Amino acid sequence: MSPERKDLEALELALRTEEEGYALYKRAAKLKLNDLTAALFSQLAKDELMHKDLIRRFYAKLKKSDSWTELSEEDKNYQGGSKQKYKTIFSDALAETKKVAPVFTSTDKEAYQKALEFEKKGMELYDRLYNETTDPVAKKFYLFLREMEREHMELLDNAIRYVESPDNYYILEEGWTMED
């Protein structure tokens, strides 16, 4: 099998993975367990759509020219915008915590844990694809996707900590400490 064909198959696998993520997050957002959970999963679903679009564009370019294309500045800048959206979602949730204690169920935590495991598998996939390719541009592409999965893992880990103890999470995020 030619290296180009192998790269196309790798992108097909990546696309299927992102499609699974999109479906998972859309279902979780519709559960409407609470406002934070719905907002986080809705944003994660939007991110997965962006990942799918990015992979499709790179797939089409690779299929047409048999060579990888560098990430554009617009592609690279997407990450920063996404981080800010998540910060806003958490800030809103923390502000609401000051007013009313949130109510979370074990289902919230389970949804976050399932999503965290999914993102971990995505990260492992992009690590494997990175290691299997010899093309330096492809390596950059897989590292970029891996970094987005890592950020999602970090976000979901924060969400789990928040669900487990909203008050303690607020104190940790604000940097408050108790002095002796």
Image: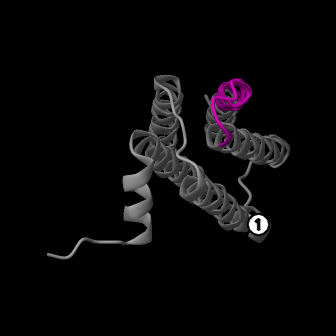
- Whether residue 101 is visible here, answered yes or no, is yes
Q: Is residue 132 magenta?
A: no
Q: Is residue 58 above or below residue 78?
A: above
Question: Relative to 122, is 140 above or below?
Answer: below
Q: Nearer the viewer, residue 10 or 125?
A: 125
Q: Position of residue 63 (x, y in %)?
A: 80, 40
Residue that sits furthest to the left in the current view: 180
**Tag 1 residue:** 72
Q: Is residue 172 left or right of residue 22?
A: left
- SS at badge 1: loop
Residue shown at the point (67%, 31%) measured from the top left? 25
Instruction: Choose top left, top right, bottom left or bottom right for residue 28.
Output: top right
User: Which of these two is toward me, 31 or 157?
Assistant: 31
Picture quadrant where residue 99 is located = bottom right
Q: In this rendered view, identify the residue nearer to me: 20 or 1.
A: 20
**Residue 32 included in the magenta stretch of the image:** yes
Quarter of the image with the C terminus is: bottom left
The magenta region covers 19-35
Residue at left offset 73%, top offset 51%: 67
